[in-house]
Amino acid sequence: MTDYSLLSRQLEALLDTRDWLTNTAQTCAFIQQEIPNLNWAGFYLQRLPEQLVLGPFQGKPACNPIPFNKGVCGAAARTRQTQRIEDVHAVADHIACDAASRSELVVPIVVDGRLWGVLDLDSPIPGRFSVDDQAGIEALVEVFKACSDLVA
């Protein structure tokens, strides 16, 4: 079982700058390294109306842009609620950037009431993300937000 309390402390120590770009790169590299069974970890940023654009990530090349009305990332952006999907192939509008991905966890990042972006994690293992994983990743997003100068 992953010790998210320890990972939160480690991430906080790693993010030694307020620069959001540096911190997105460091956060997704840290998550990819420390959390087992992932094949993609990265950020999509809201820079255009009703669309997410690709930010720093670890993994295979990714889809860009993602409209709010499509896919798991779009659902997280649209609803501002974490999406934990056991089988992405069961999602009718899933955007398949990597056919090996089977499960997905997407956490929206909201700053001052506005969507800043999302953190997207993919795994080749169906049902990879538990309720505990969701809570742990949401806590890591809170560390990222607290350590970064984010403008909504």
Image (spheres, helix red, strand yellow):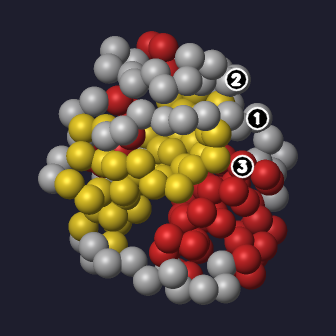
Q: Position of residue 135 (x, y in %)?
A: 59, 54
Front one among 67 and 103: 67
User: Does residue 107 appear left or right of residue 58 in this picture?
Assistant: left
- Label ID, residue 32: 3
Name the residue rendered at 39%, 22% in the picture: 94
Q: Quadrant of residue 72?
A: top left
Name the residue rendered at 55%, 24% in the picture: 98
Callout 3 crowding tier (Cα within 10 Å): few <14, some 14–19, many ≥20: many
- Tell me the kind of residue under disc 3: Gln
Q: Nearer the viewer, mark 2 or mark 3?
A: 3
Name the residue rendered at 60%, 63% in the picture: 25
The single residue placed furthest to the left in the displayed view is 49
The residue identified by callout 1 is 37
Front one among 12 and 41: 41
Location of residue 47 with respect to 68 vertically, above or below: below
User: Does residue 139 appear left or right of residue 46 in this picture?
Assistant: right
Q: Dot 3 lies on which element?
A: helix
Q: Position of residue 46 (x, y in %)?
A: 29, 57
Q: Is residue 139 visible?
A: no
Q: Nearer the viewer, mark 3 or mark 1?
A: 3
Q: Where does the C terminus fall, quadrant-wise?
A: bottom left
Name the residue rendered at 64%, 39% in the picture: 59
Front one among 6 and 29: 29
Q: Position of residue 102 (x, y in %)?
A: 59, 21
Callout 1 crowding tier (Cα within 10 Å): few <14, some 14–19, many ≥20: some
Front one among 132 and 138: 138
User: Does residue 99 appear left or right of residue 78 in this picture?
Assistant: right
Q: Are marks 1 and 2 in contact (CB under 8 Å)?
A: yes
Q: Dot 2 lies on which element?
A: loop
The residue identified by callout 2 is 125
- Tell me the kind of residue under disc 1: Asn
